[in-house]
Amino acid sequence: FLGAGGGNDIQWCFSQVKGAVDDDVAEADIISTVEFNHSGELLATGDKGGRVVIFQQEQENKTQSHSRGEYNVYSTFQSHEPEFDYLKSLEIEEKINKIRWLPQKNAAQFLLSTNDKTIKLWKISERDKRPEGYNLKEEDGRYRDPTTVTTLRVPVFRPMDLMVEASPRRIFANAHTYHINSISINSDYETYLSADDLRINLWHLEITDRSFNIVDIKPANMEELTEVITAAEFHPNSCSTFVYSSSKGTIRLCDMRASALCDRHSKLFEEPEDPSNRSFFSEIISSISDVKFSHSGRYMMTRDYLSVKIWDLNMENRPVETYQVHEYLRSKLCSLYENDCIFDKFECCWNGSDRQVEFLSLIVMTGSYNNFFRMFDRNTKRDITLEASRENNKPRTVLKPRKVCASGKRKKDEISVDSLDFNKKILHTAWHPKENIIAVATTNNLYIFQDKMN
Amino acid sequence: MLGKGGKRKFDEHEDGLEGKVVSPTDGPSKVSYTLQRQTIFNISLMKLYNHRPLTEPSLQKTVLINNMLRRIQEELKQEGSLRPMFVAASQPADPLSDNFREAQPAFSHLASPPLLPADFVSTMPLESCLTPASLLEDDTFCTSPAVQHDGPTKPPPPALQPVKDSFSSALDEIEELCPAPTSAEAVAAESAAVDSKAQPSESNIHKPEGLPESRTAESKLMDPLPGNFEITASTGFLTDLTLDDILFADIDTSMYDFDPCTSATGAASKMAPVSADELLKTLAPYSSQPVTPNQPFKMDLTELDHIMEVLVGS
C-alpha cells in the first residue's frame, strides 16, 4: 500500500537517464515540460526547441519481475516552430510550455501541446503494416504502364518495421494575446481550457476557429494591472468547475454554470500573510507557479516559490497543509531576485494512484535547485530530498537522501546553501499514474527513477 | 553571484546585501533597511529597462517587478513627503533618509521647494512601513523570528554618516565636474542627502503631468517591449531617474520651462519634450550599466554637453 509507508518508505532507485551527457547545454534541448499519459505507458517531454519526444515503456517482462519496463524513444517530432509577430516585431518562442494527454479511445494516441500562442492536437499512430501488391503502382510508388498489366491481384498488408507517425490534427491559434501558461482537458474529454496571463479560453477539441472566453482579468486601463493568471486546471470530476491561480498567491474556483464569463469566482482561496515573514519579496514568493487537483478532486495543491500548500476545497481561508521546500532560501531572496531565480516556476505533482487503493493523493513531489527534488508524505509528515545526477546513480541502488545545511556547522554529507548550484534547477517532475515510477527533468536530461521492488 | 558553487563571490555579494548589519542598534537597521530598499529599487529598474529581449518579456515578471517598484515608492512617499500630490515633488532634505534624492527632474515648473521635516524619522513609526526594520535584526535580509516594535522612534545615531558619505561621493563627483547649477532646485540638490546613481524621486509613481506625451511606466510595460529604448525612454521611471542623475547639475533647466512667454528660450521650450526623449535615447547605453556608487560620470557628462549643444541647435 503506497501511502502506508509514505515517501520515505518508498526506496527510490535510479533507472534511466535520457539526454546529452556533456555539460554544455544546447538551448534547444532544455526540457520545458514532462507528462505521463493516462496509462503510464507513454512519457512525453517538450523542449525549448519546440520538439516533443515520447518514450514508451517496454512491456513488463515476466521473467524480469524485479524491474519494471524501461522507457525507450517512441516518437520524436517538431511540434512548434518559431514564429515572428510582425506587428510587435517580436519572436514567438517555439518552446513547449505544456503537454496534456487525452485518454486513449482507439489505437492512436492524442496529446495537446502548446507554446506561448498556439495549441496543437497531435495524433500519434503506429504503422506496422503496409499494403503491397498494387496493380497500377510499383512498390516504390511509380505508376506502371497499364499496357504491361497482364494479371490482377488483390493488394495485401504485409508487416513492416514499426513506424510511429505524429500528425497535427488540429491547430488552435489566434486566441491568446498573452502567453499561454496552462492547458487542461475537461473531464468530459470534449473540451479543454487554455490560460494566458490575463485570460482563460474554453475550446472544443473538434473546433479550431472558435473559442470562448471564460475568464478575463485584463483591466480597462493596463496601468492598473497588478495581478496575472499563473496556472489553471479543470476539476478532475466536475466538468463545469475549474480553478486558476494568480501572481498574488490566490486561487479562484469558478463554476461555468454560474455565468458565461466567470469573472466572479465561486470560491477564493487565500492565506493571510504571516507578518513575521513579511519582506520586500513577499508578493513575489507568494506567486503560485503550479496548481494541481488531487485525484479525488477534494484537495488541490499549489506551489509557490518556497513551499507547497494543500488546500481543502471546502476551506478557503487557509491551506490545510504547508510543506517547506527550501526554506533556507528565505534569507537569500535579494540575490535570487537579482539573478532572476526568484521567478523560476516550479511545478508539483501528486503520487499516482496505487493498484490496490485508487485515487489517494498522499505524496507530493516538487523540484528545487542543485538538481534536488523533494517529496512530502502527507500521512507521516516525513520528507526527503533526492538528487538527480549521473554521478551518484547506479541502477537498482537506492538513492541517498540529501540534506542542505542552512546555517551553522555543516555536517558530513550535508551541502551548504552557498554551494548550491542555482543553474541546476528541477522545474518539471511527473509521477506515473499507476506505479511508483517518476520522471524528473533537469535542465536537459530526463531521469527516471523507480521504487526498489523487493 | 549565485552559480556553480561560486562560493567566494556569493559570500562577498551576500555580505553586501543580505549579510551583516553594521551594528545591532536600530539606527543602522534603518540604514540597512533603506539601503536594501534602494538596492532593490535599483535592481528592479534595471530589470525593467535593461532587458532587450527578442521575445516579449514575461508579463508576470514585469507585473511583479512593477508592483515592487510601486510599493517602494509608496513607502518613500509616506516616509518623506508632506505633499504627495506634487508630481515632481522634491524629497525632504533629511540627512537620515539616506537614499532620498534632492534633485529635481528637469521640469522645474513642477517642482516644489524642498521640505525639511526636522526629525521625521523619529516620529514616523516603522510599523507603518511595509517591512519593519526589525526584520533585519538577525542579519538576514528579509525575515526575523520576532517582529519588534520598540526602538523605531530612536533618533538615528552618527553611524549613519559613513554610509551617507559613500553614496554622496558620486554626487560630489558630479558636482566637481559641473558648473554651479542655475536653478534653485539644483542648488537644493547639492545639499541633498546621499544617493546612488539610480535614485527614484517620489514623483515616479505618478505620471508627470507636465508631459502629455509620455506614457506611464505601467502602460509601457504592459505593452510588449520591442527592446529598444525609444519606448522605454518615455516612461515615467526612466525619465526621472536618468535626468536626475546626469542632467540636473549641468543643464540650464530653464530651457525646460513650458512657459510660452519665456522669450530667450521660446524655441527651446517647444523643443524641450523632444529633447528630453532624444537625450534619453542617447543615454540608453549609459543607463544599461550596472549601478554602482563609483560610476564614472565624467565621460557621460562630456558626451551630454555635446549632445545638448547639438540639440539646442546653437
Image (cartoon, coloured by chain):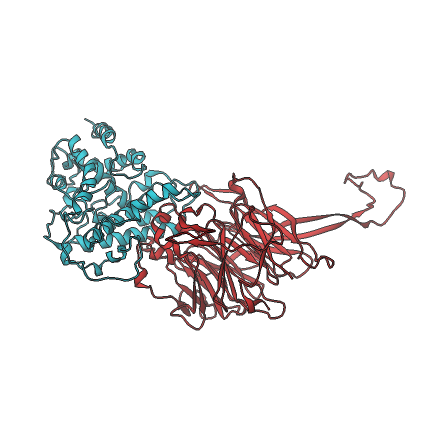
Q: Is residue A202 visible?
A: no
In the picture, one chain is cyan; tell me its letter.
Answer: B
Which quarter of the rendering shows the C terminus of chain A?
bottom right
In this view of the protein, which residue sits in the foreground, A219 or B81? Answer: B81
Task: Give the percent coordinates (x, y) of residue A100.
Answer: 56, 57
Which quarter of the rendering shows the N terminus of chain A?
bottom right
* Residue drawn at x 74%, y 50% as measured from the top left: A128
Colour for chain A in the figure: red
In this view of the protein, which residue sits in the foreground, A329 or A236? Answer: A329
Task: Give the percent coordinates (x, y) of residue B311.
Answer: 23, 30
* Residue drawn at x 26%, y 52% as measured from the top left: B72
Whether residue A354 sits left or right of residue B100 in the image: it is: right
Whether residue B241 sits left or right of residue A199 in the image: it is: left
Whether residue A302 sits left or right of residue A144 in the image: it is: left
Q: Is residue A305 above or below residue B259?
A: below
Q: Is residue B69 above or below residue A20?
A: below
In this view of the protein, which residue sits in the foreground, A423 or A123? Answer: A423
Task: Give the percent coordinates (x, y) of residue B46.
Answer: 32, 43
